[in-house]
Amino acid sequence: MNDYNDLFDENEKLIDLTLIHKTFMNFSSRYWKPSTDIYETDDDVIVYVELAGMEKNKIHLQFQKGFLLISGFRKQFHSEGITVTHQMEIDTGRFLRKIKINIDILEDDIKAEYREGILKITLPKRRTE
């Protein structure tokens, strides 16, 4: 039974080291990437970006040379005086998504709305007739 407990303890240590490494990599990364969904309709390309807790004025959009660039900054949520962190999964700081759009887009008609933590970007397709 002791061998089993020792093996279990070693596995726990390995898991802890992996989590510590992942946390360190998140902190040392220059940008984080918000979750993104991309859909296409007959008329539009629609991009949804999960940006919970963001201030609207901290989100920046740019479309150039076939790339949609979404960037910004999300501040940390925690309060002062924290002495121990038990879990930390919410990314904060600078973020950047660079999405290649392989469809001819009407750049002047791009629309964006931010509601309930989701950014919706509508990129109208250029009609070729």
Image (cartoon, grey):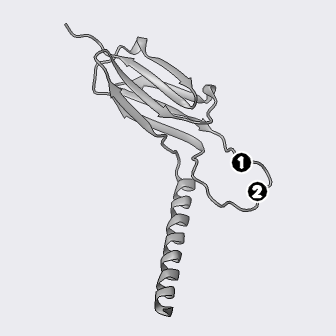
Residue at horizontal 57 percent and vertical 29 percent from the top: 59
The percent coordinates of residue 122 (x first, y second) are: 42, 20
Residue at horizontal 69 percent and vertical 44 percent from the top: 77
Which mark, residue 10? none
Q: Which of 13 and 67 is in front in this view?
A: 13
Mark 2 touching mark 1, by CB under 8 A?
Answer: yes
**Number of labelled discs?**
2
Residue 89 vertical position relative to residue 64 in the rendered view, above or below: below
Crowding around mark 1 (Cα neighbors within 10 Å: few <14, some 14 to 19, many 20+) is few
Q: Mark 1 points at which residue?
A: 78
Residue 78 vertical position relative to residue 114 in the rendered view, above or below: below
Residue 127 vertical position relative to residue 9 in the rendered view, above or below: above
Kind of element beneath mark 2: loop
Residue at horizontal 43 percent and vertical 36 percent from the top: 36
The percent coordinates of residue 129 (x first, y second) are: 19, 7
Q: Name the residue under label 2.
A: 82
Kind of element beneath mark 1: loop
Amino acid beneath label 1: His
The percent coordinates of residue 113 (x first, y second) are: 52, 20
- Location of residue 84 (image quadrant): bottom right
Distance between the alpha carbons at the discs numbered 2 and 1:
8 Å
Amino acid beneath label 2: Ile
The percent coordinates of residue 19 (x first, y second) are: 53, 64
Compared across the picture, whether 76 is left or right of 112 comes to right
Compared across the picture, whether 11 is left or right of 99 comes to right
Residue 107 vertical position relative to residue 4 in the rendered view, above or below: above
Crowding around mark 2 (Cα neighbors within 10 Å: few <14, some 14 to 19, many 20+) is few
